[in-house]
Image (cartoon, helix red, strand yellow):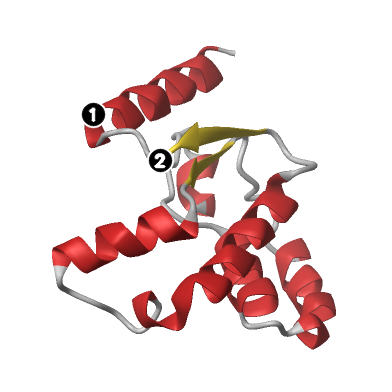
Amino acid sequence: IKPSLEQGNHVVCDRFVESSFAYQVRGSVRPDLEKTFHVVDDITDGAKPDLYIVLDLDPKVANNRVAERKEFNRFDLLGEDYHGRVRRGILEYVSDKTHVIVDASLNKEQVAEKVLREIKTCLLQ
């Protein structure tokens, strides 16, 4: 990420440190890791997102979508309580950062349109 930023490129990531915070600290109920997480977060050496785009989806809806695809990974099997904690963790993490929340219960085309609009808006600032 950093070399690309230093070259003046824009970088889009599908996950950043908020995922680690949400999954490891909040989802796994490991408050003992919170201090360590913040130390690691501080050493990203200036590679901080200008904008967080959160694709927000109720865990019940997410579970229904997972069930429809009939392919599961280990996170899919952790249940709604776990995914509710992860969701709250992500929202907590971005709460004091520049972020946009996109309703991911919309269809793929609508979600993609909203995400692209937010990226374009951010790039034009």
Q: Is residue 84 left or right of residue 118?
A: right
| Type of amino acid under label 1 | Glu
Quadrant the C terminus occupies? top right
Q: Which residue is mark 2?
A: 104
Above-or-below relation of 93 to 22 = above
Coordinates of residue 33 in the picture (x, y in percent): 76, 83
Q: Nearer the viewer, residue 109 or 48?
A: 109
Q: Which residue is mark 1?
A: 109
Q: Nearer the viewer, residue 74 or 16?
A: 74
Above-or-below relation of 23 to 29 = above
Disc 1 on helix, strand or loop? helix
Q: Nearer the viewer, residue 99 or 109?
A: 109
Above-or-below relation of 37 to 32 = above
Choose top left, top right, bottom left or bottom right for residue 41: bottom right
Choose top left, top right, bottom left or bottom right for residue 97: top right
Coordinates of residue 11 in the picture (x, y in percent): 44, 41
Q: Is residue 70 left or right of residue 11?
A: left
Name the residue: 23% across, 29% down: 109
| Type of amino acid under label 2 | Ala
Characterize the local packing of mark 2: few (<14), some (14-19) or many (20 or more) Cα atoms within 10 angstroms: some
